[in-house]
Amino acid sequence: MGIFSKLRGQFIDVIEWVDPSNKTMVYRYEDDNREIMMGAQLTVRESQVAIFVNEGKIADVFQPGRYELSTQNMPIMTMLRSWKYGFNSPFKSEVYFVNTKQFLDQKWGTSNPVMMRDTEFGMIRLRAFGIYSFRVSEPTVFLKEVFGTSDLYTIDGVEGQIKRTIVSALSDVIAQSKIPALDLAANYDELSDFAKNAIAPRLTPLGLKLESVIIENISLPPEVEQAMDRRTSMGVVGDLNRYTQYQAAEAMRDAAQNEGGVAGVGAGLGAGMMMNQAMVNAQQQAAAAAQAGAPQAPGQATVPCINCAAPISPEAKFCPECGTKQAQATRCTNCNAELAPEAKFCPECGHKQ
């Protein structure tokens, strides 16, 4: 009985595999130099594919299910071996279990900044990161092109290739989209879809399928972010005159709380007041230029003030600028033309006044 037990131990009658790591893509079944019995039970679970390799060539491929290895279930193996002693004879073969599930939450990111030409900021450098997911779509192609004869193959073997492919494709997508840097955050979903469509054909020859690409963040260089923050602050401040006055009051309060601080803050306060006056003058000049360049509406002719020459309405009795009383012009009783004081005839129509 001991001899029969030893012989029976040289045969494999149950073949199955369960992934304990959640990272294994391919596992070669450990046979310990034993042979597989014809009639052995093969269990292939969902999200798995079993590949039998005989003498270095791919023989039979089994999809999820339970099989009893026989000539009906192993036609290629039967043809390759041509057993002479009946189909119950044991055979030697390598069995690979390929994990076809979706591998989620894989990280990607730019190791170096990506150059981009922006319409507003010019040449800028971008950094981006996110996650992606993929799966093995063609197990036999993956066996031939990637993992070969390895005993164990994990996602560490392909993640570097996929990450670099994503970064390369994303750089092209961002450049071709011509989306301004300030609007990139509002277009993460669109950029992710474009990147996925651009990357997927590059992974197909490896037997892989890219299921999703998600962009979590695209960041600008620190100097560009600082410029954007300053621009945002200017918009929040609004009235620069009142903001400068507020800063001056705050500086005086802080100086009063510190011993000897009033003298030290004097120079800064004077500079702030000069800046405030310069901004006020600039605003006044801009307003005057706008008023001078504004076209006059029809029927709103003006005459100069007799004292300060400010433009005023012909019907105005007093100047709105200096308050000087204006002399009322005499008009022709016939054509309403303006007459010189004490004129007896109209210079336009000749009518006697």
Image: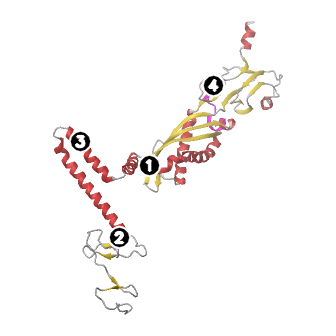
- Mark 4 crowdedness (10 Å alpha carbons): few <14, some 14-19, many ≥20: few
Mark with earlier residue (4, 3): 4
Q: Amino acid at mark 1?
A: Arg
Mark with earlier residue (3, 1): 1
Would you say the residues marked 2 and 3 are in contact, meaning their CB atoms lie under 8 Å apart? Answer: no
Nearer-the-camera pick, 109 or 227:
227
Horizontal and vertical percent position of residue 108: 52, 39
Q: CA distance from mark 2 to mark 3?
A: 42 Å
Mark with earlier residue (2, 1): 1
- Judged from the image, the secondary structure of the residue bearing numbered disc 3 is helix
Q: Amino acid at mark 2?
A: Ala
Would you say the residues marked 2 and 1 are in contact, meaning their CB atoms lie under 8 Å apart? Answer: no
| Front label number (2 vs 4) | 2
What residue did someone put label 3 on? Answer: 253
The tag on residue 292 is 2
Q: Amino acid at mark 4?
A: Asp
Residue 325 sits above or below residue 145 on the image: below
Q: Does the magenta run of residues contain 145?
A: yes
- Judged from the image, the secondary structure of the residue bearing numbered disc 4 is loop
Mark with earlier residue (2, 4): 4
What residue did someone put label 1 on? Answer: 125
Horizontal and vertical percent position of residue 237: 36, 49
Residue 152 sits above or below residue 352 on the image: above
Please tell me which residue is depicted at 37% across the width and 48% down the height of the picture: 233
Q: Amino acid at mark 3?
A: Arg
Task: Name the image quarter holding the N terminus.
Answer: top right
Q: CA distance from mark 4 to mark 3?
A: 69 Å
Q: CA distance from mark 1 to mark 4?
A: 42 Å
What residue did someone put label 4 on? Answer: 19
Which residues lie in the magenta part?
143-152
